Image: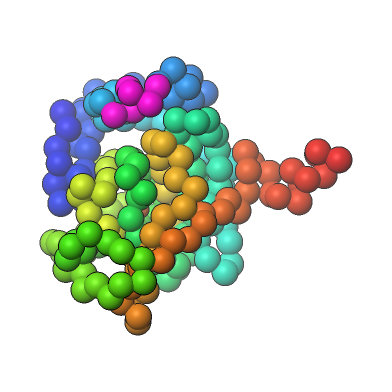
């Protein structure tokens, strides 16, 4: 069963099939732009549990900001492991008209949703209205879903321990708009990977040489 709350949390069924990352990727690689817009992913995540250990080869923490570690990608989706040291957080951001599902793997993260008053224009001043209270989710409890129809959001590790989350975007999101809370305006930012398929960029470049 899928339940859309403020955070659009997908409730887990009591009968979850344990599955591997490879099986999950096989499922994702069968999807098309069209099927990613259906409930196919919702239904899969509501009935399958992926072993946490499967994501460890893609788990790299970053000192200066939260880490975006690419697991796999094609033209229709990208799957990332995001790592969060204590107090690391995102800016308030949109999702570039794409869909986003998130699995909590370790620790806890705090989500806060916002609504922009009127259509977003870069450089123009905006006031954002918080929608609902900030919600903190722990590992192993829920899957979160968000898209631009639901709103903007920020994610923060407000705990004193590291956190790990897995994010599925359909389609890939190479850039998104972030909100500058001091200037009260939006700007586009390019989104980078900290590591690529379990390799740091240095290792990837060495393998290509
Ligand atoms: Fe997000």
Q: Which residues are magenta?
A: 32-37
The quadrant of the picture occupied by the N terminus is top left
Asked if residue 52 lies in the magenta stretch, the reply is no
Residue located 18% across and 62% down the image? 118
Q: Can see residue 18?
A: no
Relative image position of residue 172 (x, y in whole percent): 46, 40
- Against 163, is 144 above or below? above
Relative image position of residue 174 (x, y in whole percent): 49, 48
Residue located 48% across and 25% down the image? 25
Q: How is the image coloured?
A: rainbow
- Front-most of residues 198 and 108: 198
Residue located 22% across and 59% down the image? 119
Relative image position of residue 81 (x, y in whole percent): 49, 45
Is 67 positioned to the left or the right of 127 in the image? right
Is 45 positioned to the left or the right of 31 in the image? left
Q: Can see residue 106?
A: yes
Residue located 58% across and 67% down the image? 63
Asked if residue 34 lies in the magenta stretch, the reply is yes
Is 90 positioned to the left or the right of 58 in the image? left
The quadrant of the picture occupied by the C terminus is top right
Residue 179 sits in quarter: bottom left
Q: Residue furthest right?
A: 209
Residue 176 sits in quarter: bottom left
- Against 3, is 13 above or below? above
Q: Total label count?
A: 0
Relative image position of residue 93 (x, y in whole percent): 35, 60
- Against 117, is 15 above or below? above
């Amino acid at each position: 069963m899928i339940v859309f709350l403020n955070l659009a949390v997908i409730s887990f069924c009591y009968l979850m099939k344990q599955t591997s990352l490879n099986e999950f990727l096989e499922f994702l690689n069968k999807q098309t732009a069209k099927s990613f817009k259906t409930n196919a992913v919702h239904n899969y995540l509501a009935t399958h549990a992926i072993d946490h250990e499967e994501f460890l080869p893609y788990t790299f923490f970053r000192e200066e900001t939260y880490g975006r570690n690419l697991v796999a990608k094609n033209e229709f989706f990208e799957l990332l492991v995001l790592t969060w040291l204590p107090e690391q957080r995102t800016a308030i951001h949109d999702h570039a008209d794409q869909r986003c599902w998130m699995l909590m793997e370790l620790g806890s993260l705090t989500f806060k949703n916002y609504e922009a008053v009127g259509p977003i224009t870069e450089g123009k001043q905006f006031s954002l209205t918080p929608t609902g209270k900030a919600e903190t989710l722990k590992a192993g409890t829920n899957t979160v879903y968000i898209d631009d129809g639901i709103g903007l959001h920020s994610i923060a590790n407000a705990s004193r321990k590291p956190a790990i989350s897995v994010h599925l975007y359909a389609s890939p999101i190479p850039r998104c708009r972030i909100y500058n809370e001091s200037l009260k305006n939006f700007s586009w930012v390019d989104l980078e990977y900290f590591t690529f398929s379990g390799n740091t960029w240095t290792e990837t470049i060495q393998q290509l040489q």
